[in-house]
Amino acid sequence: MALSVDSPFDNKALQSYFHDPNFLAVYGSRVFQQTGVDSSRSIVDLIVGIRSTREWHRKNLAEHPQDYTVPEKKLGLYLMKWIQYQGGGINYRARVSVQDQLVKYGTISREDLLRDLREWEMLYVAGRLQKPTLIVKSDPEIEGAMQLNLMHALRAALLTLPSHFTEKELYETITGFSYRGDVRMWVSEDPKKVERIVGGSLEHFKTLYRGAIERRSDVLTTLSEGRFEQDISPEA
C-alpha cells in the first residue's frame, strides 16, 4: 500500500542515476521521522534492486567511480560480489552525493531480493521492508513478494504476542525482528531505536499493515482504536 510521504529526490532523475533499476526504495530518518531524533543531518538510505549485479556495477563503476573505494576499484567486481554475500545479499556504498543529498545505497540482485522477501533467507532487506519505506519503483512480482513479507511479519508477531495487545506493541514486535541478534544494537546503535521508529511513524505502520490485518480477521479482532484481541487457541 502506497505511503503518503514526500521524496527528497527528483524520482525520474534518481532512477536514471541508478541505471533504471528493477526496484528502488528510499528510507531512513530523513524520510520517516523517528521520535526524539534530529534528522536534519541524517543521510538518506536507499535500496536498489537490479537484474545483474555484475553488469550493473561494471556500468556504475565507469559512470560513478567516486562511489567506490580504492580496493574495490583495484579488485573490481569479484570483491564486490564477495562483500555482497557477506552482508545479507546487499552491497552498500556510503556517503555518496546524489542530487545534492548525502546518501547510503545498497544494491541487491532482483533474484536475491525476491527470495529474501518470500523466504526470509537473510531477513536483512526483508526486515527493512517490513517497516515504512518510500517505494520509488517496483514491479508486480516484487510488490506481491512485499505483501507476502508483510503477512509473514504479522503472523510471526502474533505467535509471540499475548491474547490482548496494542497496535504499538504489534509494530514494535515486527520492527524488532530485524534487529534481534544485530550486535550494533549493543555497541553503537540507539537501544531505543525500535521504539523511536514506531513512535515517529505509527500512522505509516497503520497504512502499511492495514491489508494484512484485515486478511487475518479469522483470528484477529479489533477491540477499539489501537487495541487488538487474538485467538490463541491450539486450533487457531
Image (cartoon, rainbow, N blue to C red):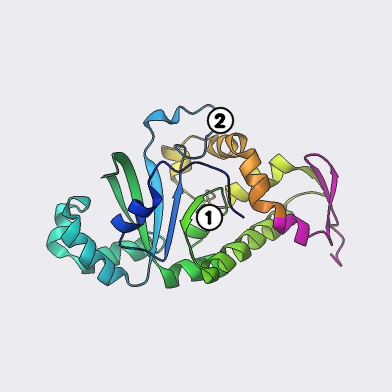
Q: Is residue 89 magenta?
A: no
Report x, y in % for residue 22. Answer: 41, 66
Seen in the image, is 221 located left or right of residue 127? right
Name which residue lies at 54% across and 50% down: 180
Seen in the image, is 52 located left or right of residue 32? left
Using the rendered view, name the quadrant where residue 146 is placed: bottom right
Foreground of the two, 121 or 226: 226
Identify the element where label 2 is drawn: loop
Using the rendered view, name the quadrant where residue 201 is placed: top right
Identify the element where label 1 is drawn: loop
Name which residue lies at 30% across and 47% down: 94
Q: Quadrant of the N terminus?
A: bottom right
Is residue 45 visible in the rendered image? The answer is yes
**What is the spatial separation of the Cα atoms under label 1 and label 2, in whole angstroms?**
20 Å
Foreground of the two, 9 or 128: 9
Mark identifier at residue 35: 2
Tell how many labels. 2
Q: Residues within 10 Å of mark 2 (few under 14, many from 20)?
A: some
Q: Relative to residue 74, is residue 167 depicted above or below? A: above
Tell me where the magenta segment starts and ends, as one range: 211-236
Tags 1 and 2 in contact by the CB under 8 Å rule? Answer: no
Report x, y in % for residue 235. Answer: 87, 67
At label 1, the amino acid type is Leu
Question: Which circle's residue, 1 or 2, is located before the other in the chain?
Answer: 2
Q: Quadrant of the C terminus?
A: bottom right
Q: Relative to residue 147, is residue 230 depicted above or below? A: above
Report x, y in % for residue 21. Answer: 37, 64
Name which residue lies at 26% across and 63% down: 80
Is residue 120 visible in the rendered image? The answer is no
Q: Residues within 10 Å of mark 1 (few under 14, many from 20)?
A: many
Mark identifier at residue 129: 1
Q: Relative to residue 98, is residue 18 depicted above or below? A: below
